[in-house]
């Protein structure tokens, strides 16, 4: 397992694991769904929506990896950096730095 000294060092690796456009779209859609479910959890004061947020976010991302990228999600090896990478990539897609 490759070690990274910082998130700055990890992020280029993370992006290389998300080269497939369909996979990135699934990640983005999962992140959007997760945000909706977090908002529902807050609005309804129901923590079960947080579970839905996790399931939606990770299920779509993992479908992208297993069926389109044909690789193993970085979450399994680098869970914290991978979680941060999801949101940085989400921002980069929103701002147009990475194609949707």
Image: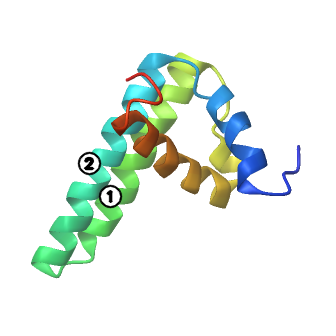
Report the residue marked by disc 2. Answer: 33
Residue 15, given in percent of the width and then of the height, sits at: 62, 32
Q: Secondary structure at mark 1?
A: helix
Which residue is farthest bottom? 45
- Asked whether 4 or 29 is in front, the reply is 4
Above or below, 64 against 35 in this view is above
Q: Residues within 10 Å of mark 2 (few under 14, many from 20)?
A: some
Where 21 falls versus 59 (above or below)?
Answer: above
As drawn, 100 above or below 32: above
Per the image, the residue denoted by label 1 is 53
Residue at 16% in and 67% down? 40
Under circle 2, the secondary element is helix
Q: Position of residue 63 (x, y in %)?
A: 46, 30
For the residue pair 3 and 59, the one nearer the viewer reads as 3
Q: Residue 73: where, in percent of width, then height?
A: 63, 38
What's the residue at 62%, 19% (across, down)?
70
Residue 88: give x, y in percent of width and height.
51, 48
In the figure, is residue 44 to the left or right of 78? Answer: left
Pick the quarter of the image with the C terminus. top left
Asked if residue 99 shows in the view, the reply is yes
Of residue 83 and residue 91, the one placed in the foreground of this image is: 91
Q: Are marks 1 and 2 in contact (CB under 8 Å)?
A: yes
The answer to whether residue 77 of the structure is visible from this angle is: no
Residue 96 occupies which quadrant of the picture?
top left
Across the whole image, how many numbered discs are drawn on residues? Answer: 2
* Mark seen at residue 74: none
Q: Is residue 79 left or right of residue 98?
A: right
Precedes in sequence: disc 1 or disc 2:
2
């Amino acid at each position: 397992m490759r070690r990274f000294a910082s998130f700055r060092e990890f992020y280029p690796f993370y992006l290389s694991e998300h080269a497939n456009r369909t996979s990135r779209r699934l990640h983005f859609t999962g992140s959007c769904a997760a945000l909706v479910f977090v908002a529902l959890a807050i609005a309804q004061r129901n923590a079960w929506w947080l579970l839905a947020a996790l399931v939606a976010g990770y299920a779509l991302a993992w479908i992208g990896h297993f069926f389109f990228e044909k690789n193993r999600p970085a979450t399994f090896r680098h869970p914290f950096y991978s979680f941060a990478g999801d949101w940085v990539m989400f921002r980069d897609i929103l701002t147009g730095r990475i194609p949707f």
